[in-house]
Structure formats: structure tokens, C-alpha cells
Image: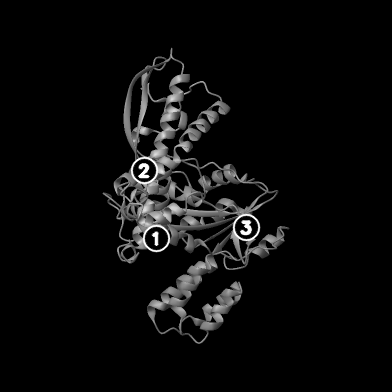
Amino acid sequence: MEKDITDSVTLKEIEWELFRALQRAFADLFRQVLEEIDQRLAEQRDKRRYALKAKRSITMQTMFGEVEITRNDYFDREKQRYTSLLDGFLAFEGAKGMSPLLEAAAIELAVTGSSYRQAAKALEHMVGYQALSHETIRQVMLEAKVDVHRPVDSFQRQVLFIEADGLYVSRQKSRRKAREEKILAIHQGWEPHGKRVKLVNKRHYVHQGEEDIWEGLERFLIEEYGYDPLNDLVVINGDGAPWITQCREYFGHRGYFQLDRFHVAKELRACCFGHPRWKVMKKKLAQFDEEGLLLELNSAVGTLGDEGKEALLATLIHRIESMPGCLSDYREWLRKKGIDTTGMRPMGSAESTMSVFAYRVKHRRSWSHRGLKAFLHVFIAVKDALPIRTRKGDQVSVGEPTERKQMIIRKAKSRARANVPETIRNNLPYLRWSSGTLMHEVLTGLRGL
């Protein structure tokens, strides 16, 4: 007994061995299910259309390791091409050598991680082997297609809230070192979520192409939110960039523009921090007292004792005065329009939205135009829970209705399930140890649980 204890493996080794054993068992069962389905498809196919040509083995990377499958290849006499009924039946492309679940995990890690290399390493730690290289993940992102159309419920005379900001991203092989990506976040308001609140039906819009940005956004609002230009209202929050302030002319009386208070506070601190009226200025800004703030700023002109700060102050005053109401509370404007503002909160999430994008696309990185465009589409799809279409095989009809298809899969799983005990035993090394060892006795005692 003492020898068994001193010579026993560590907890880490047991955990790792069991994990690898389950991976091998899954791979074996996965292979059995797919080959059983392939065999049933072969028996029930339209033999006049699909001519069996050969059996070929493919190796597929999955979340549980490499799986080698032997499947039937056919010649489709009707379409005059070679195909696999298994691929079409299960809507995947076996020749690519990657399972859809592994592909989806790679996309999620590529979006939430800091780089494609980091995503590849994270995936390796997750599944226990080097499943995909960083270049393969990059190609997956480039080939992914996003269905951006997902309409949400619209309300009668609704108010849409828009946070607008720009993000400068370095480009490869371009005369301009960086170009601005115009990104807008849209939502329908706020609702309680536990002790906090969450945005209702939040979506993102990245402007691309030569079309005017506000025309493109309005079309997006119509398609996704059922926006009615004659009845609905929009509230836009952003900094003083010219392309953002153009929304005032585009939407006219249907829209309200508000300067992002984060940027205003940043500029205010840069020019007036340490001034005797500094705390009063901050209070006026927090209270949406635009007239009071302008009064304080104008009274501070010529008292800062620094030419650079005086120039910043003059620029800030001019920006605020050129857009009357830009620091007032938008809810007052809505109430005058007859809108109930209960539950509405101050806006200002534009900067936090940009930080999420900047974390992934900036930080000493440069992008090709195609690579950045593809990444942003997938990034937004993950954030907005949009469907992503990745590498899929051709949809080949085998004349099976949905009920019949489900029955084929159910029978294949049932047959594989009967082989589970033997499959696990063959893949669990501890069960093949000598019956006198402590580990064998422990695992044998678990039989039947």
C-alpha cells in the first residue's frame, strides 16, 4: 500500500491523462457517428444521380483533437461534378479539415484576444494541442461572411440614441500612415439589468464606401430599426469632428446633437485646471448648465497666464458657441417634443466603445484594407450576436425530409452510444493497469455510477 502511495501520479497528471483520454474517446465516437451517417446516405441515395467513386480519408481538426474519417466520394451526374453527400447533409466542408465548432471558437478568440497569434495560443491551451495556426485563423476571418440584417422591434415614434466617434488605424502599404474608421453605436434606450442597466438592442455601424456617412446610417436605421424619418427622433453624441457635427444639418429638427462630455471635460482640464473657478466650471458641466459654463469660460479668458492654454480655451469656447444647445440636457429637448424621458440616462459611451475597438486594432499594429474590413465585420457580428457564415460545403439534396434526416442522425448516435464503454476503456490507460494498483481499484469502484 505504501509503495502505491509513493509511486502514484500527481493530481495534475491524473487530470491531464483523463482529459486526453476523453479527447481520444470523443474522436473515436465522433468518427463512428459520421461514418454511420455516411453509410446510411450511401444506401438511400439516388443511385442514378450519384455514382460512388471511392472512399477517401480526411483528417479534421476538432475541439477534441484530430479525427480521421473515411467517407464516400460521388460523381453527381446531374451537375457534372464530384461531391460528398456527408458534407452536404451536415452543411460543412470536410476538405477544409476543420470542424465548425473549432472554427467558431477560433473566431471568438480572435475577436476577444489581442492578436491572431494570441488566439492561436489560447486555442492550443484550451484544446490541448496546436489545432490552428495564427495564419489559418486569419484566413478564417477573411473568408467569414456576416449577415448584417437582423431587424429589431421598433416602437411608435421611437427615439434612437447614437454614439459617434472615429478611430485612426495604421495601414499597410499606404501613403497615409493611418486612416480614420467612422464607428457608430446605436441603441433604443436603457433597461434595468440587476443592479445595473443595459442598452436596449445595441448595434454597431462602421461606415465604408463613398456614400455620405449619415445617408448610410439612416438607411441602416430604416432596415434594422424600422426608423421612420417623418416621426422618429435621433439623439447623437460625439466630439466636435466635422463629419460628426454634419448630423445637425442632415437630421435638422428630427435630431439633437450633444457634445461628448468626456471630450469636453478633457479639454476643460487641459486649459483650466488649477484656475480659481475650476471646480465651478466642472459643476456647471455636470449640471448641463451650458450658459453658466460659457459665462465661466469667458470670464477666464486672459487669466490663465499661458498662451497655449489661452488658445485651447478660445477653441473650446468657439466650439460650444457655434452649436447652441450642445451641452444642454437632451432630455429637455425630448420633453418639449412630447416624449416621456423616464428611465433615460446621460449619454457618453462613445469613448468606451472606441476603447473596445482600439484594444484589438491598434497598439502598434498595421492592417491591409481587406484584412481590416473583414475583421471589423466579424468583430461587430460577435458583439451584436449576428450570424456568421464560415466555410461550408455545398448543400447537396439527397431527397431526405427533415424528419428523415433527424432519424438518420439519431440512429447513428444510438449505434455509437452502444460502443461508449468499450471506447472509453480502450482510451483510458489507467483501466489497463495491473489490477493490484491503487488507481485501478479506485476506478473499478466507480463502475456503475
Q: Nearer the viewer, mark 1 or mark 2?
A: 2
SS for dot 1 = helix
Which residue does the image show at 48% across and 85% down from the upper left?
A: 275
User: Which residue in the protein does label 1 denote?
Assistant: 359
The mark found on residue 426 in the picture is: 2
The answer to whether 375 is drawn above or below residue 403 in the figure is: below
Residue 427 image offset from top left, x and y in percent: 36, 45
Q: Which mark is residue 189?
A: 3
| Residue drawn 46% across the image and 54% down it | 445
Q: Is residue 379 left or right of residue 287?
A: left
Along the viewing direction, whichever of 191 and 428 lies nearer the viewer: 428
Marks 3 and 1 sit apart, C-alpha to C-alpha, by 26 Å
Q: Amino acid at mark 1?
A: Tyr
Percent across and percent down for residue 111 are 41, 52
Which amino acid type is shown beneath numbered disc 2? Answer: Asn
Is residue 209 shown to the viewer in this render?
no
Please tell me the numbered disc located at residue 40: none
Residue type of the residue flagged with mark 3: Gly
Task: Locate residue 272 relative to residue 189 in the image: left or right.
Answer: left
Under circle 3, the secondary element is loop
